[in-house]
Amino acid sequence: MTYLGIDLGTSEVKAVLTDDDSTVLGSSGTRMDAQSPHAMWSEQSPEAWWTATVTSVNALREKFAGAFKEVKAIGVSGQMHGATLLDAHGNVLRPAILWNDTRAFAECEELEANEPRSRVITGNLAMPGFTAPKLMWVARHEPAVFRATKKVLLPKDYLLWRLSGEFVSEMSDASGTLWLDVEKRDWSDRMLAATGLTRDHMPRLVEGSSVAGRLRADLRQEWGFAGEVVLCGGAGDNAASAIGLGVCQPGSGFLSLGTSGVLFAGTDRFMPNAEQGVHAFCHCLPRRWHQMSVILSAAASLEWLSRVLGVSVAELSLRAMQSIPAAAPLFLPYLSGERTPHNDANARGVFFGLTSSHSAADLAYSVMEGVAFAMADGYAALQSAGSRLDAVSFIGGGSRSGFWAELCATATGIVVRRHQGGDLGAAIGAARLARLASSSESVDEVCVPPPTTEVYEPNRGLKPLLEERLFRFRNIYEQLKKVFATSL
């Protein structure tokens, strides 16, 4: 038997085909674009998600026909927080509002005023990237759309609906809506009422490793599957990446430098620290939770510099190693505002200390260092919530740079490990969840860490300098916080 894992990212849909041992037999990917029609907006077409999914799956079917027809189960992971609005006939009412859209910052304060126990129930601050404030924005600015909305789906759950005809979600992704009672693992009627919604607007909930439905008969026939195909609950992208990396137990974690940056720590109970912007979410496995610190512009910061300078990301990563850190400017990577620990939608990117002598290499170093410092701020928030991490897996586009890995290790004090197949972690995790849903195997049997390829330890020689620069980095934000709030 084989398993299909689909990961709906912001810029690409990836699909992997794995065997009974979770060995990757093949993978494919289809690129997508997001739209930003106004400042602070980020949107995508759900139909583009479906088209990219079908294209990726068909590529696997054509290249690995024999193994593909033996697929027993499918798992889907996806970008979190996106608001996908459907009417009574299943029509999409507007483009999906994505995780990195910050237009709903005013609605966050209103939501917490409507439900004073919001942080207790959800374990999280109301942030504009979360789903619930987006619906309040729609209610205020697009009331006809809000009135017509009958179902609110997260991005991956839209794909699950297209695959199965079922409206279903699971705990890890639902945790990022602000409608879930994260400790009880159920929709909160109080949080729904605070946004003018009810349970009828929500999909039913299952665990990520449980059966969510069956593949539609027409798709099963079109794709040539030999028998019935199970669909599991799946996971939000970070929880799915954790499954792909074997991050299932308390004390295990990963650091991801994708478009956003994530430091993920597994826990065996609900451990919130909302005041510092820590995300306390359910894991996609029963009776397990996790914490995350999240920054909004990680690898995206280096990609921005690449566009501005007309130099490839790979070349900038090499040039950064030529800079003299003590002389480089400091960079605040808040190009899209920030989540952990500041929860500041008004924060903006800053180069501090620029002179005419600074080069592209210095700017590249500063950006990579600034992202590492933001991850260090996130880890400090996780520590305040009770998490300790000695070593983490390193994934995301930024993980291709060993230099960046060492910067992150030195700034956080955590050993960083790269793994074989780490760039497919979420899709592999989705396939593993499908395997759990359709077999009698245990989590320990299925969710094993992939082989380690490189290990990066904190650079003791560089650590004193980075500690001094991190202190200045933090002070710059504190000095500018009021300026950010009044300058937009």
Image (cartoon, grey):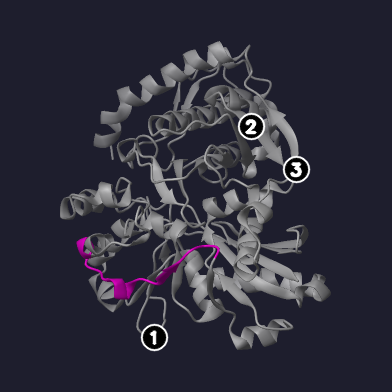
Q: Is residue 208 left or right of residue 246?
A: left
In this rendering, the answer to whether 88 lies above or below 430 is below
| Residue 281 drawn at (x, y percent) | 42, 50
Residue at the location (75% across, 64% down)? 20
Residue at (63% x, 70% y) in the render = 438
Structural distance between the alpha carbons of marks 2 and 3: 14 Å
- Hey, what amino acid is under mark 2? Val
Q: Which residues are magenta?
A: 193-209
Question: Horizontal and vertical percent for residue 357?
Answer: 57, 16
Q: Horizontal and vertical percent for residue 371?
A: 52, 32
- For label 3, the residue is 451
Q: Callout 3 environment at 10 Å: few (<14), some (14 to 19), or many (20+)?
A: few
Residue denoted by label 1:
89
> In the picture shown, does residue 437 fall above or below 300?
below
Give the number of marks.
3
Name the mark nearer the viewer: 1 or 2.
2
Q: Which residue is mark 2?
A: 416
Q: Is residue 222 left or right of residue 350?
A: right
Q: Which amino acid is tagged 1?
A: His
Q: State the image quarter where residue 440 is shown.
A: bottom right
